Amino acid sequence: MRRAGFVTNLPAYLYSRPAHLRPAQNTQQDKSMEKFEVNILGCGCAIPTSRHRPSSQIVNIREKLSMIDCGEGTQMQMRNQRLHFMNLRNIFISHLHGDHCFGLMGLISTLGMLGRTAKLHVYAPACYEGLFGQQLAFFCQGMDYEVVFHPVDTTRYQTIYDDRSMSVSTLPLDHRVPCCGFLFREKPTLPHIRRDMIDFYNIPFCEIGNIKNGADWTLPDGTVIPNSRLTRPAEPARSYAYCSDTAYKPDLQPYLEGVTLLYHEATFGEDRAKRAEETRHSTARQAALMAKACHAGQLLIGHYSAHYQDESILLNEARQVFPNTLAAMEGMTLKL
């Protein structure tokens, strides 16, 4: 199973952190693969700290940027990571707690001041639609682009976005307010052409498209060359799941089965399991149990409580159950 790798474009202050909380260089990624990256803008909890920013991530699939959640300061984090504002197509809001959405209106306003003209699509819990319209009318008058609101039913699994390269589906979560996660799936790509076989059988260039789409090749003497001899299988389609905020929810497993990278909140450790249950959050161990149950390629934990000054406590707890676990940090970019 493919696992996420890393690139390091971290702010300087992060290099002072322990090595196990810093990403390592990934030198083995297939350069022929289309881009599928996750940028961590914020991985803190509701109470602001000097260590972490409120929740927000950017998913980059083939240069199409989608934002998941938009806490305070998100647009500054985008600038810090040199992410292009105008490439942002969709914003997905998991729920209406402030640490996940208080940066939304500011970002929408900034996009207007930057001269955006392309539509921006916002997917958020249906209960936000009325207030969203009022906020937009009050704070973002006279913009030259359209913001399209898509009400989301957080109680069921459904595909809410689909194009030629990817789909996004909701993941019903268990929190104190209506809340859902998001599952990003890359569309399968066509097989690779074996150039040596194309040359050997003198297949004209105009037939390459048909062969990539599964056609065999017939020689002048009637011999049929099977497509499997002319192509190599494409890389498996990759996927990314975002599960925050939520109590431990084992019935997510079928939706997450075999996911390449799973982001699962780990607000607390087992030392505060009772508090996690009361607030409908998860412990690091529970996040790891979910990753193990769904056979995830890799687990990324985040949404750390301000109670913890050292995330290695949570990381080590998760790794006892699911060794291939990483701790999210602002500035981290993960390549799937």
Image (spheres, rainbow, N blue to C red):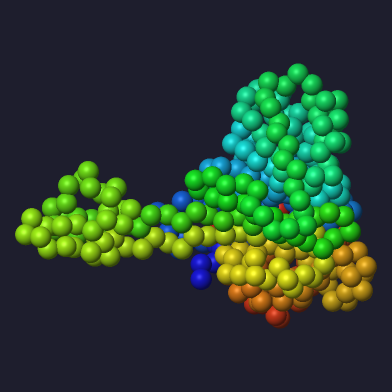
Q: Position of residue 305 (x, y in %)?
A: 85, 62
Q: Is residue 147 left or right of residue 6?
A: right
Q: Residue furthest top?
A: 142
Q: Is residue 195 left or right of residue 46?
A: left
Q: Is residue 333 visible?
A: no
Q: Residue at x 92, y 74 (%)?
A: 274
Q: Is residue 223 visible?
A: yes
Q: Position of residue 128 (x, y in %)?
A: 83, 42
Q: Position of residue 165 (x, y in %)?
A: 50, 48
Task: Classify residue 21 by image quadrant.
Answer: bottom right
Q: Is 42 in front, or is 278?
A: 278
Up/down of 180 relative to 75, above or below: below
Q: How many marks?
A: 0
Up/down of 275 relative to 330, above or below: below
Q: Is 107 in front, or is 52?
A: 107
Q: Residue at x 66, y 34 (%)?
A: 120
Q: Is residue 262 left or right of residue 108?
A: left
Q: Is residue 193 left or right of residue 130?
A: left
Q: Residue at x 82, y 32 (%)?
A: 133
Q: Position of residue 326 (x, y in %)?
A: 66, 67
Q: Residue at x 87, y 55 (%)?
A: 177
Task: Classify residue 179 by image quadrant.
Answer: bottom right
Q: Is 237 in front, or is 88?
A: 237
Q: Residue furthest left?
A: 221
Quadrant location, the C terminus? bottom right
Q: Residue furthest bottom?
A: 320
